Image (tube, rainbow, N blue to C red):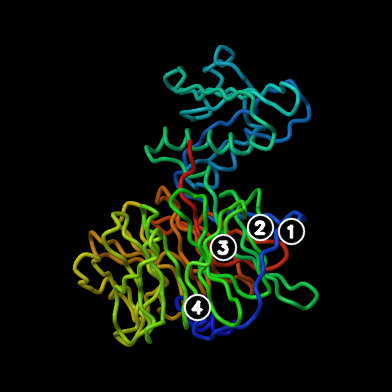
Amino acid sequence: MQLLKAKPGLFKSIMLTAGLAGMFGIMLPTQAQARLTIEINESYENALPIAIVPFASNSAAMPENIAQIVRDDLRRSGKFKPLPVGSLPAQPSLAEEVDFAQWRPLDIDNMLIGKVVDMGNDRYQIEVRFMDVLRKQQVFGKRWSNIPGRQLRQIGHLISDLIYEELTGVRGAFNTQIAYVTLKNENGKRRYTLEVADADGYNPQPILRSPKPIMSPSWSPDGKKLAYVSFEKGRSYIIVQSLDGKYRETLASFTGINGAPAWSPDGQKMAMTLSKDGSADIYVMDLQTRALKRVTRDWSIETEAAWAPDGRSIYFNSDRRGQPQVFQVLLETGEIKRITYEGRYNANPEVSPDGRYIAVVHGQGGFNIGLQDLQTSQFNVLTHTFLDESPTFSPNGEMILYAMNQNDKGKLAIVSPDGKTSQVLSVQDGQVREPAWGPFLNR
């Protein structure tokens, strides 16, 4: 792990080049995984006050507190400031129960009310109404019926998404998932686990466990599969696996480096770093025919491909100028141009969903997350944490999840494109690295 501390942005390349040995195996343990815990360490100035009223219920033992889930989601976004439940003047659950005169002195524009009905046999009906306090009218209403208890958290995230989109005009990303790798010492031995959890850290599910490193998880555009790098028989392999574990295939096992997989936006191709022809270069594989196309040719290390949203070009980092910088290759012509110039070290590019920004690991007296605006060429350093790496955008582009080190422990953190950090995610026992934020799930 000392190599990681030396150059976070090239960690994947260095680890692959080192050719770590070890046997690999899938294990889906029955014991519950420790969920990510979240610390809110900064909040946005001018966060919008909002009232999330506790939902009425016909049962005293609900499996989930949906209103609290919505409250936590909106607070974590940094854009909203839910009022404390104790300061609410009333707890209505129906539109006709709202006395707007009670709420006007609180200086809020909106409030959420709702109720949950236990229908028996672990089935529930949820009804919510989002109210405009100033206009004294309902903004939207929604009802879900016959929902099993295990899906109540998802309903909470869906409600949060509706509110976020209504008030910001941007689709919410609370009902999404993140993938990450945890590292724990068990009886003196290292154990790596690739996990998938809800965006708020709940419901972690192990995808695989291995005594050797797991790196570079990459989501398929439909959110049903992950590509990742594992080590088998002493060298790196690129694996594609479904989240339910029913499908698993080795995609690349060439001699030398097989690393840094990245799905194309249409899900038909995979960019990757291979060294089978000598140097480490970027290749694109057609996932139906398995045909390979070499898109870079240089004796330097070319790695960490990231697709442009239109699928017509790929960003990657290369040390062809002596220090790692980000370049772009146009797939139709093969033309390559340099993208980053700020500082001597920029690596691990990640493209925003709208294609405007590139997040990078920026080295300048430390390693932090930087953001390159492709329209204005402006470059900003977003983070001030330690040994930052692996930036990944939320599917709505509103947040950037990344790995960092705090008190010699690997954690995840989230920062907005304007540089305001809102939370840190960690596991109680062990370390967490290699985050990848998944795509939007079906509404």
Is there a contact, CB below 8 Å, between mark 1 and mark 3? Answer: no
Q: Which mark is residue 206?
A: 2
Tell me the crowding category of disc 4: few under 14, some 14 to 19, or many 20 or more residues within 10 angstroms, Cα based: many
Calculate the distance from the C-alpha at mark 1 to the C-alpha at mark 3.
Answer: 23 Å
Identify the residue position indicated by label 4 in the image: 11
Q: Where residue 424 appears, x then y in whole percent?
A: 58, 59
- The residue type indicated by label 2 comes to Pro
Residue at 62% over, 19% down = 92
Calculate the distance from the C-alpha at mark 2 to the C-alpha at mark 1.
Answer: 7 Å
Q: Which mark is residue 29?
A: 1
Answer with left or right where residue 62 lies relative to residue 11: right
Q: Residue furthest top?
A: 96
Q: Where residue 62 appears, x then y in whole percent?
A: 74, 31
- The residue type indicated by label 3 comes to Leu
Residue at 37% over, 37% down = 169
Splitting the image into 4 quarters, where does residue 292 fall?
bottom left
- Between disc 4 and disc 1, the foreground one is 1
